[in-house]
Amino acid sequence: MSNKESQQFVCPPGLSHNSQMGDVHTVLLCTFFTLFSTFWCCVRPDFPSPRDSKLRILSMKLNVIFWALVCPELVLYWATKQWFEAGKVAEWFRRDNFEITCIVLHTDYS
Amino acid sequence: MGGFVLCDKNGQPTKVLTFPHFRRLLDEGVIDFPCLTSSEIQERSNFHPAFALVALLQAAWFITRCFSRLINASLMDPGIPVITQLEAMAAATVVVNWCTFFFAWEKPLDARSHILILIKATASPSTHHDRYQLRGPDTIVTEDFEREENLSGSQGTERRIQLEFPELESTSISKSIASFRITPLALLSTLFWPITSISIDLFTKLVPDEGGPSEFPDGTLKIPLFYVQNTMPQHTVLLPAITVGAGVSIFFLLLRPGSILYLSSWAARLWWAASISSTMLSVCMLASAILASVFYLLTFPLSPSNCMHACLTGLSNLFKSPFLSTLSLWLGLFFFYRVVSLAAAVISFRSTVGVVFWGRSWVDYIPHFS
Protein backbone atom coordinates (compact mmCIF):
# COMPACT_ATOMS: atom_id res chain seq x y z
CA MET A 1 0.00 0.00 0.00
CA SER A 2 1.49 3.35 -1.00
CA ASN A 3 1.48 6.60 0.92
CA LYS A 4 -1.24 8.11 -1.20
CA GLU A 5 -3.52 5.18 -0.61
CA SER A 6 -2.89 5.10 3.09
CA GLN A 7 -3.53 8.83 3.46
CA GLN A 8 -7.03 8.37 2.09
CA PHE A 9 -8.11 7.05 5.48
CA VAL A 10 -9.88 9.60 7.58
CA CYS A 11 -8.37 10.40 10.93
CA PRO A 12 -10.83 9.37 13.65
CA PRO A 13 -12.08 12.07 16.00
CA GLY A 14 -9.96 12.66 19.06
CA LEU A 15 -6.65 11.86 17.38
CA SER A 16 -4.53 14.69 16.03
CA HIS A 17 -1.57 14.41 13.66
CA ASN A 18 0.85 14.88 16.55
CA SER A 19 -0.61 11.96 18.50
CA GLN A 20 -0.31 9.77 15.41
CA MET A 21 3.34 10.61 14.99
CA GLY A 22 3.84 10.03 18.70
CA ASP A 23 2.41 6.56 18.26
CA VAL A 24 4.77 5.91 15.37
CA HIS A 25 7.74 6.84 17.53
CA THR A 26 6.35 4.80 20.40
CA VAL A 27 6.09 1.70 18.24
CA LEU A 28 9.59 2.25 16.87
CA LEU A 29 11.03 2.71 20.34
CA CYS A 30 9.30 -0.28 21.88
CA THR A 31 10.36 -2.47 18.94
CA PHE A 32 13.93 -1.32 19.38
CA PHE A 33 13.85 -1.80 23.14
CA THR A 34 12.32 -5.28 22.83
CA LEU A 35 14.92 -6.36 20.29
CA PHE A 36 17.77 -4.84 22.30
CA SER A 37 16.79 -6.49 25.58
CA THR A 38 16.14 -9.81 23.84
CA PHE A 39 19.49 -9.82 22.11
CA TRP A 40 21.30 -8.74 25.24
CA CYS A 41 19.93 -11.71 27.15
CA CYS A 42 19.78 -14.37 24.47
CA VAL A 43 22.92 -13.83 22.42
CA ARG A 44 25.82 -15.43 24.25
CA PRO A 45 29.09 -15.74 22.35
CA ASP A 46 31.81 -18.12 23.41
CA PHE A 47 34.69 -17.20 25.71
CA PRO A 48 36.87 -14.62 23.99
CA SER A 49 40.60 -14.98 23.75
CA PRO A 50 42.51 -13.63 26.79
CA ARG A 51 44.28 -11.26 24.40
CA ASP A 52 41.17 -9.90 22.73
CA SER A 53 40.45 -6.23 23.08
CA LYS A 54 37.08 -4.95 24.25
CA LEU A 55 36.36 -3.75 20.73
CA ARG A 56 36.89 -7.21 19.32
CA ILE A 57 34.70 -8.79 21.99
CA LEU A 58 31.98 -6.29 21.17
CA SER A 59 32.35 -6.96 17.46
CA MET A 60 31.94 -10.71 18.14
CA LYS A 61 28.69 -10.05 19.94
CA LEU A 62 27.49 -7.70 17.21
CA ASN A 63 28.28 -10.38 14.65
CA VAL A 64 26.05 -12.87 16.43
CA ILE A 65 23.36 -10.22 16.82
CA PHE A 66 23.47 -9.57 13.09
CA TRP A 67 22.90 -13.25 12.36
CA ALA A 68 20.21 -13.44 15.04
CA LEU A 69 18.44 -10.64 13.16
CA VAL A 70 18.89 -12.04 9.67
CA CYS A 71 18.41 -15.73 10.37
CA PRO A 72 17.63 -16.51 14.02
CA GLU A 73 17.11 -20.20 13.20
CA LEU A 74 20.83 -20.58 12.63
CA VAL A 75 21.66 -19.13 16.03
CA LEU A 76 19.06 -21.45 17.54
CA TYR A 77 20.74 -24.39 15.82
CA TRP A 78 24.10 -23.30 17.18
CA ALA A 79 22.79 -22.88 20.73
CA THR A 80 20.96 -26.22 20.62
CA LYS A 81 24.06 -28.03 19.49
CA GLN A 82 26.16 -26.40 22.20
CA TRP A 83 23.55 -27.33 24.79
CA PHE A 84 23.61 -30.99 23.82
CA GLU A 85 27.40 -31.05 23.67
CA ALA A 86 27.72 -29.33 27.05
CA GLY A 87 25.34 -31.92 28.50
CA LYS A 88 27.54 -34.71 27.25
CA VAL A 89 30.67 -33.08 28.66
CA ALA A 90 28.98 -32.46 32.01
CA GLU A 91 27.89 -36.08 32.17
CA TRP A 92 31.45 -37.18 31.53
CA PHE A 93 32.74 -34.78 34.22
CA ARG A 94 30.31 -36.11 36.77
CA ARG A 95 31.14 -39.73 35.99
CA ASP A 96 34.86 -39.01 36.16
CA ASN A 97 34.50 -37.15 39.44
CA PHE A 98 32.56 -40.09 40.82
CA GLU A 99 35.30 -42.49 39.78
CA ILE A 100 37.98 -40.27 41.35
CA THR A 101 35.96 -40.08 44.56
CA CYS A 102 35.62 -43.86 44.65
CA ILE A 103 39.36 -44.32 44.13
CA VAL A 104 40.17 -41.82 46.90
CA LEU A 105 37.74 -43.48 49.31
CA HIS A 106 39.09 -46.89 48.48
CA THR A 107 42.67 -45.67 49.11
CA ASP A 108 41.71 -44.06 52.42
CA TYR A 109 39.98 -47.10 53.80
CA SER A 110 42.46 -49.68 52.59
CA MET B 1 32.95 -23.28 24.72
CA GLY B 2 36.58 -22.26 24.68
CA GLY B 3 36.75 -21.69 28.42
CA PHE B 4 39.67 -24.03 29.16
CA VAL B 5 43.10 -22.57 28.45
CA LEU B 6 46.27 -24.57 28.86
CA CYS B 7 49.04 -22.77 30.75
CA ASP B 8 52.72 -23.49 30.94
CA LYS B 9 54.67 -23.77 34.19
CA ASN B 10 55.06 -20.00 34.33
CA GLY B 11 51.30 -19.56 34.29
CA GLN B 12 51.20 -18.03 30.83
CA PRO B 13 48.27 -19.11 28.63
CA THR B 14 49.45 -21.02 25.62
CA LYS B 15 46.48 -22.52 23.83
CA VAL B 16 42.77 -23.14 24.03
CA LEU B 17 41.80 -26.72 24.85
CA THR B 18 39.11 -28.63 23.05
CA PHE B 19 37.29 -31.28 25.00
CA PRO B 20 38.95 -34.31 23.29
CA HIS B 21 42.35 -32.71 23.79
CA PHE B 22 41.57 -31.95 27.43
CA ARG B 23 40.43 -35.49 28.00
CA ARG B 24 43.52 -36.95 26.35
CA LEU B 25 45.83 -34.80 28.50
CA LEU B 26 43.91 -35.90 31.57
CA ASP B 27 44.15 -39.57 30.64
CA GLU B 28 47.89 -39.24 30.09
CA GLY B 29 48.31 -37.59 33.49
CA VAL B 30 49.75 -34.35 32.11
CA ILE B 31 47.18 -32.17 33.82
CA ASP B 32 45.08 -32.46 36.95
CA PHE B 33 41.33 -32.65 36.96
CA PRO B 34 40.17 -29.05 37.59
CA CYS B 35 38.25 -28.42 40.80
CA LEU B 36 35.14 -26.83 39.35
CA THR B 37 31.61 -26.40 40.50
CA SER B 38 28.66 -25.21 38.49
CA SER B 39 28.31 -22.14 40.72
CA GLU B 40 31.92 -21.26 40.02
CA ILE B 41 31.22 -21.30 36.31
CA GLN B 42 28.04 -19.28 36.76
CA GLU B 43 29.92 -16.64 38.74
CA ARG B 44 31.81 -15.78 35.56
CA SER B 45 28.52 -14.76 33.98
CA ASN B 46 27.33 -11.16 33.87
CA PHE B 47 23.74 -12.24 33.72
CA HIS B 48 21.08 -11.39 36.25
CA PRO B 49 17.71 -13.15 36.25
CA ALA B 50 15.93 -9.91 37.11
CA PHE B 51 17.03 -8.34 33.85
CA ALA B 52 15.98 -11.48 32.00
CA LEU B 53 12.56 -11.24 33.65
CA VAL B 54 12.13 -7.63 32.54
CA ALA B 55 13.25 -8.53 29.02
CA LEU B 56 10.93 -11.54 28.93
CA LEU B 57 7.95 -9.47 30.09
CA GLN B 58 8.70 -6.83 27.49
CA ALA B 59 8.97 -9.49 24.77
CA ALA B 60 5.73 -11.11 25.92
CA TRP B 61 4.00 -7.73 25.86
CA PHE B 62 5.32 -7.03 22.36
CA ILE B 63 4.12 -10.37 20.97
CA THR B 64 0.75 -10.00 22.68
CA ARG B 65 0.27 -6.53 21.28
CA CYS B 66 1.12 -7.66 17.74
CA PHE B 67 -1.41 -10.47 17.93
CA SER B 68 -3.97 -8.24 19.59
CA ARG B 69 -3.77 -5.72 16.75
CA LEU B 70 -4.03 -8.48 14.17
CA ILE B 71 -7.12 -9.94 15.85
CA ASN B 72 -8.74 -6.55 16.30
CA ALA B 73 -8.23 -5.76 12.66
CA SER B 74 -9.91 -8.92 11.52
CA LEU B 75 -12.91 -8.21 13.74
CA MET B 76 -13.39 -4.51 13.13
CA ASP B 77 -12.20 -3.40 9.74
CA PRO B 78 -10.25 -5.85 7.60
CA GLY B 79 -9.25 -3.13 5.14
CA ILE B 80 -6.98 -1.20 7.49
CA PRO B 81 -3.46 -2.51 7.92
CA VAL B 82 -2.54 -2.72 11.56
CA ILE B 83 0.98 -4.03 11.74
CA THR B 84 4.15 -2.91 10.02
CA GLN B 85 6.78 -5.08 8.37
CA LEU B 86 9.23 -4.11 11.07
CA GLU B 87 6.94 -5.35 13.82
CA ALA B 88 6.18 -8.61 12.00
CA MET B 89 9.87 -9.37 11.53
CA ALA B 90 10.72 -8.27 15.06
CA ALA B 91 7.99 -10.51 16.53
CA ALA B 92 9.31 -13.61 14.75
CA THR B 93 12.90 -12.76 15.69
CA VAL B 94 11.98 -12.27 19.32
CA VAL B 95 10.15 -15.61 19.52
CA VAL B 96 13.04 -17.57 18.01
CA ASN B 97 15.58 -15.77 20.17
CA TRP B 98 13.71 -16.67 23.32
CA CYS B 99 13.78 -20.28 22.17
CA THR B 100 17.55 -19.81 21.90
CA PHE B 101 17.55 -18.39 25.39
CA PHE B 102 16.10 -21.63 26.75
CA PHE B 103 19.09 -23.58 25.42
CA ALA B 104 21.66 -20.92 26.40
CA TRP B 105 20.28 -20.44 29.91
CA GLU B 106 23.28 -22.01 31.66
CA LYS B 107 25.89 -20.59 29.33
CA PRO B 108 27.75 -17.71 31.01
CA LEU B 109 26.79 -14.35 29.53
CA ASP B 110 29.72 -12.14 28.49
CA ALA B 111 32.21 -14.22 30.45
CA ARG B 112 35.76 -12.88 30.38
CA SER B 113 37.93 -14.90 32.75
CA HIS B 114 39.06 -18.32 31.54
CA ILE B 115 39.61 -21.50 33.48
CA LEU B 116 43.36 -21.94 33.48
CA ILE B 117 44.65 -25.50 33.33
CA LEU B 118 48.20 -25.86 34.65
CA ILE B 119 50.58 -28.58 33.55
CA LYS B 120 51.73 -30.82 36.35
CA ALA B 121 55.18 -30.04 37.69
CA THR B 122 56.25 -33.68 37.36
CA ALA B 123 55.23 -33.98 33.75
CA SER B 124 58.02 -33.54 31.24
CA PRO B 125 57.30 -32.44 27.70
CA SER B 126 58.67 -35.64 26.26
CA THR B 127 56.21 -37.85 28.14
CA HIS B 128 53.12 -36.61 26.35
CA HIS B 129 52.24 -36.16 22.77
CA ASP B 130 51.45 -32.49 23.02
CA ARG B 131 53.52 -30.47 20.61
CA TYR B 132 53.77 -27.68 23.11
CA GLN B 133 57.26 -27.16 24.56
CA LEU B 134 58.48 -25.28 27.59
CA ARG B 135 59.94 -21.82 27.39
CA GLY B 136 63.27 -20.35 28.27
CA PRO B 137 64.48 -18.67 31.51
CA ASP B 138 62.08 -16.37 33.29
CA THR B 139 64.39 -13.39 33.58
CA ILE B 140 64.85 -12.93 29.86
CA VAL B 141 61.15 -13.39 29.24
CA THR B 142 60.21 -10.78 31.84
CA GLU B 143 62.46 -8.20 30.21
CA ASP B 144 61.07 -9.05 26.82
CA PHE B 145 57.50 -8.70 28.05
CA GLU B 146 58.30 -5.29 29.53
CA ARG B 147 59.77 -4.21 26.23
CA GLU B 148 56.78 -5.62 24.39
CA GLU B 149 54.39 -3.19 26.10
CA ASN B 150 55.68 -0.46 23.83
CA LEU B 151 54.38 -2.34 20.79
CA SER B 152 50.78 -2.21 19.67
CA GLY B 153 48.30 -4.04 17.47
CA SER B 154 49.43 -6.99 15.40
CA GLN B 155 53.09 -6.18 16.11
CA GLY B 156 52.50 -6.76 19.78
CA THR B 157 50.61 -9.99 19.15
CA GLU B 158 53.34 -11.27 16.89
CA ARG B 159 55.99 -10.38 19.43
CA ARG B 160 54.10 -12.12 22.23
CA ILE B 161 53.81 -15.29 20.17
CA GLN B 162 57.50 -15.12 19.38
CA LEU B 163 58.23 -14.88 23.08
CA GLU B 164 56.03 -17.76 24.05
CA PHE B 165 57.00 -19.97 21.15
CA PRO B 166 60.60 -19.22 20.25
CA GLU B 167 60.83 -22.51 18.43
CA LEU B 168 58.17 -21.35 15.97
CA GLU B 169 60.03 -18.30 14.77
CA SER B 170 61.23 -20.06 11.67
CA THR B 171 57.71 -21.12 10.72
CA SER B 172 54.87 -19.03 9.45
CA ILE B 173 52.41 -20.02 12.19
CA SER B 174 53.17 -17.06 14.42
CA LYS B 175 52.86 -14.66 11.51
CA SER B 176 49.58 -16.18 10.39
CA ILE B 177 48.15 -15.97 13.92
CA ALA B 178 49.42 -12.43 14.36
CA SER B 179 47.86 -11.32 11.09
CA PHE B 180 44.49 -12.85 12.01
CA ARG B 181 42.97 -9.51 12.87
CA ILE B 182 43.72 -7.74 9.67
CA THR B 183 43.24 -10.41 7.02
CA PRO B 184 40.12 -9.74 4.95
CA LEU B 185 39.72 -13.47 4.42
CA ALA B 186 39.58 -14.02 8.18
CA LEU B 187 37.02 -11.23 8.45
CA LEU B 188 34.85 -12.81 5.77
CA SER B 189 35.13 -16.28 7.29
CA THR B 190 34.15 -14.85 10.66
CA LEU B 191 31.22 -12.99 9.17
CA PHE B 192 29.87 -16.01 7.32
CA TRP B 193 30.33 -18.48 10.14
CA PRO B 194 26.88 -20.08 10.07
CA ILE B 195 27.17 -21.18 6.47
CA THR B 196 30.65 -22.62 6.91
CA SER B 197 29.78 -24.19 10.26
CA ILE B 198 26.65 -25.94 9.04
CA SER B 199 28.21 -27.10 5.80
CA ILE B 200 31.20 -28.51 7.68
CA ASP B 201 28.89 -30.26 10.15
CA LEU B 202 26.73 -31.76 7.44
CA PHE B 203 29.57 -32.88 5.21
CA THR B 204 31.38 -34.35 8.22
CA LYS B 205 28.24 -36.32 9.00
CA LEU B 206 27.82 -37.42 5.41
CA VAL B 207 31.47 -38.42 5.08
CA PRO B 208 32.47 -39.43 8.62
CA ASP B 209 36.04 -38.66 9.53
CA GLU B 210 37.03 -40.75 12.52
CA GLY B 211 40.24 -38.86 13.24
CA GLY B 212 38.87 -35.36 13.06
CA PRO B 213 40.49 -32.17 14.29
CA SER B 214 40.39 -32.95 17.99
CA GLU B 215 42.61 -30.06 19.02
CA PHE B 216 43.61 -26.61 17.95
CA PRO B 217 47.14 -25.92 16.71
CA ASP B 218 49.75 -24.61 19.08
CA GLY B 219 49.49 -20.99 20.02
CA THR B 220 45.76 -20.83 19.35
CA LEU B 221 44.37 -18.37 21.82
CA LYS B 222 41.68 -17.28 19.44
CA ILE B 223 39.24 -20.12 19.04
CA PRO B 224 36.96 -20.17 16.03
CA LEU B 225 34.13 -17.87 16.94
CA PHE B 226 31.37 -20.45 16.94
CA TYR B 227 33.33 -23.63 17.44
CA VAL B 228 31.25 -26.55 18.70
CA GLN B 229 32.35 -30.11 19.30
CA ASN B 230 31.04 -32.35 16.59
CA THR B 231 30.16 -35.51 18.46
CA MET B 232 26.39 -35.32 18.42
CA PRO B 233 24.22 -36.89 15.75
CA GLN B 234 23.00 -34.00 13.63
CA HIS B 235 19.49 -35.41 13.44
CA THR B 236 18.93 -34.62 17.09
CA VAL B 237 19.84 -30.97 16.79
CA LEU B 238 19.02 -30.01 13.26
CA LEU B 239 15.41 -31.11 13.27
CA PRO B 240 14.13 -28.75 16.04
CA ALA B 241 15.96 -25.79 14.53
CA ILE B 242 14.55 -26.47 11.08
CA THR B 243 11.08 -26.91 12.56
CA VAL B 244 11.29 -23.50 14.21
CA GLY B 245 12.65 -22.00 10.99
CA ALA B 246 9.76 -23.45 9.03
CA GLY B 247 7.38 -22.07 11.65
CA VAL B 248 8.82 -18.58 11.24
CA SER B 249 8.60 -18.74 7.47
CA ILE B 250 5.03 -20.02 7.52
CA PHE B 251 4.12 -17.28 10.00
CA PHE B 252 5.36 -14.68 7.51
CA LEU B 253 3.49 -16.38 4.70
CA LEU B 254 0.19 -16.62 6.57
CA LEU B 255 0.06 -12.94 7.47
CA ARG B 256 -2.82 -11.53 5.52
CA PRO B 257 -1.95 -9.07 2.76
CA GLY B 258 -4.06 -6.40 4.44
CA SER B 259 -2.41 -6.91 7.80
CA ILE B 260 0.90 -5.37 6.90
CA LEU B 261 1.56 -1.84 5.78
CA TYR B 262 3.92 -1.75 2.83
CA LEU B 263 5.86 1.25 1.61
CA SER B 264 5.07 0.54 -1.99
CA SER B 265 4.08 -2.22 -4.34
CA TRP B 266 7.69 -3.34 -4.80
CA ALA B 267 8.04 -3.72 -1.05
CA ALA B 268 4.93 -5.90 -1.01
CA ARG B 269 6.22 -8.02 -3.88
CA LEU B 270 9.60 -8.33 -2.18
CA TRP B 271 7.95 -9.40 1.04
CA TRP B 272 5.95 -12.11 -0.69
CA ALA B 273 8.97 -13.30 -2.66
CA ALA B 274 10.97 -13.51 0.55
CA SER B 275 8.16 -15.30 2.36
CA ILE B 276 7.58 -17.85 -0.39
CA SER B 277 11.29 -18.43 -0.89
CA SER B 278 12.05 -18.95 2.78
CA THR B 279 8.93 -21.08 3.28
CA MET B 280 9.76 -23.35 0.37
CA LEU B 281 13.34 -23.67 1.57
CA SER B 282 12.24 -24.46 5.12
CA VAL B 283 9.55 -26.94 4.08
CA CYS B 284 11.89 -28.82 1.71
CA MET B 285 14.58 -28.96 4.36
CA LEU B 286 12.09 -29.98 7.02
CA ALA B 287 10.61 -32.78 4.91
CA SER B 288 13.99 -34.23 3.97
CA ALA B 289 15.30 -33.87 7.53
CA ILE B 290 12.22 -35.62 8.97
CA LEU B 291 12.54 -38.51 6.51
CA ALA B 292 16.27 -38.83 7.13
CA SER B 293 15.71 -38.77 10.90
CA VAL B 294 12.89 -41.33 10.75
CA PHE B 295 15.00 -43.81 8.81
CA TYR B 296 17.93 -43.10 11.10
CA LEU B 297 15.82 -43.79 14.20
CA LEU B 298 14.48 -47.01 12.70
CA THR B 299 18.02 -48.38 12.57
CA PHE B 300 18.38 -48.26 16.36
CA PRO B 301 16.63 -51.55 17.26
CA LEU B 302 18.40 -53.41 14.46
CA SER B 303 21.85 -54.91 14.68
CA PRO B 304 24.49 -53.46 12.35
CA SER B 305 24.95 -56.83 10.66
CA ASN B 306 21.32 -56.90 9.58
CA CYS B 307 20.75 -56.10 5.93
CA MET B 308 17.69 -54.03 6.92
CA HIS B 309 19.99 -51.81 8.95
CA ALA B 310 22.14 -51.12 5.92
CA CYS B 311 19.06 -50.47 3.82
CA LEU B 312 17.61 -47.96 6.29
CA THR B 313 20.97 -46.23 6.69
CA GLY B 314 21.18 -45.92 2.92
CA LEU B 315 17.67 -44.42 2.81
CA SER B 316 18.58 -42.00 5.57
CA ASN B 317 21.66 -40.89 3.64
CA LEU B 318 19.59 -40.67 0.48
CA PHE B 319 17.26 -38.12 2.03
CA LYS B 320 20.22 -36.06 3.16
CA SER B 321 21.02 -35.39 -0.49
CA PRO B 322 17.91 -33.27 -1.21
CA PHE B 323 18.50 -31.57 2.11
CA LEU B 324 22.04 -30.61 1.16
CA SER B 325 21.13 -29.66 -2.40
CA THR B 326 18.23 -27.49 -1.18
CA LEU B 327 20.50 -25.86 1.35
CA SER B 328 23.30 -25.16 -1.09
CA LEU B 329 21.06 -23.97 -3.93
CA TRP B 330 18.72 -21.72 -2.01
CA LEU B 331 20.71 -20.54 0.92
CA GLY B 332 22.30 -17.55 -0.84
CA LEU B 333 18.94 -16.42 -2.19
CA PHE B 334 17.37 -16.98 1.20
CA PHE B 335 19.90 -14.79 3.00
CA PHE B 336 19.66 -12.12 0.31
CA TYR B 337 15.90 -11.92 0.69
CA ARG B 338 16.11 -11.86 4.45
CA VAL B 339 18.60 -8.97 4.46
CA VAL B 340 16.67 -7.00 1.85
CA SER B 341 13.37 -7.60 3.66
CA LEU B 342 14.89 -6.37 6.88
CA ALA B 343 16.24 -3.26 5.20
CA ALA B 344 12.88 -2.67 3.49
CA ALA B 345 11.08 -3.06 6.81
CA VAL B 346 13.27 -0.40 8.42
CA ILE B 347 13.09 1.98 5.45
CA SER B 348 9.33 1.63 5.05
CA PHE B 349 8.80 2.49 8.69
CA ARG B 350 9.96 6.06 8.01
CA SER B 351 7.00 6.58 5.71
CA THR B 352 4.49 4.94 7.99
CA VAL B 353 1.52 7.19 8.65
CA GLY B 354 -0.75 7.10 11.60
CA VAL B 355 -3.43 4.85 10.12
CA VAL B 356 -1.77 1.76 11.51
CA PHE B 357 -1.91 3.06 15.05
CA TRP B 358 -5.49 4.26 15.29
CA GLY B 359 -7.35 2.98 18.24
CA ARG B 360 -5.99 1.44 21.40
CA SER B 361 -5.84 -2.15 22.47
CA TRP B 362 -6.16 -3.52 26.00
CA VAL B 363 -2.53 -4.54 25.71
CA ASP B 364 -1.50 -0.87 25.72
CA TYR B 365 -2.56 -0.62 29.35
CA ILE B 366 -0.15 -3.31 30.53
CA PRO B 367 3.03 -1.78 31.99
CA HIS B 368 5.84 -1.86 29.45
CA PHE B 369 8.82 0.12 28.19
CA SER B 370 8.30 2.21 25.09
Image (cartoon, grey):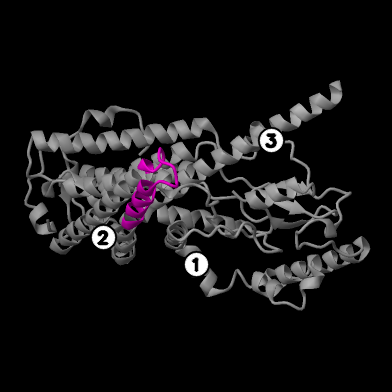
Residue at mark 2 shares a chain with residue at mark 3: no
Q: Nearer the viewer, residue B24 or A63?
A: B24
Element at label 2: helix
In the image, what residue type sits under mark 3?
Answer: Asp
The kind of residue tagged 2 is Ala
Tag 1 residue = B189
Name the residue carrying label 2.
B344
Segment colored magenta: B297-318
**Is residue B273 something one can see in this rendering?**
yes
Density class for disc 2 (Cα within 10 Å; few <14, some 14-19, many ≥20) is many
Q: Position of residue B153 (x, y in %)?
A: 67, 69
- The residue under label 3 is A96
Three-letter residue code for mark 1: Ser
x, y percentage for residue B16?
A: 67, 55
Q: Quadrant of residue B160?
A: bottom right
Q: Say if the magenta span includes residue B350.
A: no
